[in-house]
């Protein structure tokens, strides 16, 4: 089942889980969005036991951060690290919440700014016109894939 809100027919109406993969593929084409040299040795959070297994994890995280910032521009590094955080597991102590790596998020936000996809105004990170265009193009691509997988959705007029 595909989760699509039909009141607003743009990239914001598409479920984020469908957008992340396609957007990550598009972000690979940007020269400024690349994993730093230390990314192959870094865990994404303190509570993780091993490194990410997906070789494209940097692009997936960048796509996810971009989608989260497009929906809530007031998110900062600290709030995003809470979003990607999880539970620390220990044997004798109760579980407690742990944030993810803020260095990864800061680096990704800096790369998105350098690529002219987002811009910072005060404490808000706003999507630029180029960023909106990129997200709408990816949204169209995802909608076409969804239409092929679920023909009943082809009756809706998707105006991006």
Image: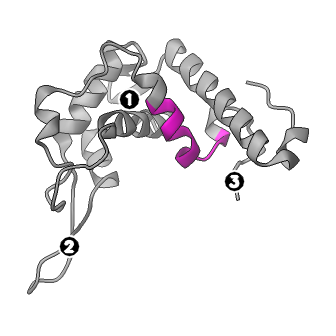
Q: Residue 14 in the image: x percent, y percent?
A: 64, 42
Determine if the magenta segment contains residue 17. Answer: yes
Counting residues from the start of the chain, the first of labels 1 and 3 encountered is 3
Determine if the magenta segment contains residue 29. Answer: no
Q: Is label 1 in a helix, a strand or a loop?
A: strand
Q: Residue 92 in the image: x percent, y percent?
A: 8, 87
Identify the residue under disc 3: 2
- Is any atom of residue 34 visible in this view? yes
Q: Nearer the viewer, residue 42 or 97?
A: 42
Q: Is residue 138 left or right of residue 156?
A: left
Counting residues from the start of the chain, the first of labels 1 and 2 encountered is 2
User: What segment carries the magenta color?
Assistant: 13-24
Identify the residue under disc 1: 124
Q: Residue at x 34, y 53 (%)?
A: 83
Counting residues from the start of the chain, the first of labels 3 and 2 encountered is 3
Q: Which mark is residue 96?
A: 2
């Amino acid at each position: 089942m595909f989760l699509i809100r039909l009141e607003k027919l743009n990239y914001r109406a598409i479920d984020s889980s469908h957008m992340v993969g396609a957007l990550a593929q598009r972000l690979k084409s940007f020269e400024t969005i690349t994993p730093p040299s230390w990314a192959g040795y870094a865990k994404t959070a303190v509570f993780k036991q091993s490194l990410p297994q997906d070789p494209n994890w940097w692009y997936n995280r960048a796509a996810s951060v971009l989608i989260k910032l497009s929906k809530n521009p007031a998110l900062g590094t600290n709030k995003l690290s809470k979003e990607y955080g999880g539970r620390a597991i220990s044997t004798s102590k109760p579980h407690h919440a742990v944030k993810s790596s803020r260095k990864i998020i800061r680096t990704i936000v800096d790369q998105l700014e350098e690529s002219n996809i987002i811009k910072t105004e005060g404490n808000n990170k706003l999507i630029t016109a180029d960023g909106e265009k990129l997200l709408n193009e990816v949204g169209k691509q995802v909608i076409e894939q969804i239409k092929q997988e679920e023909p009943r959705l082809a009756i809706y007029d998707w105006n991006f």
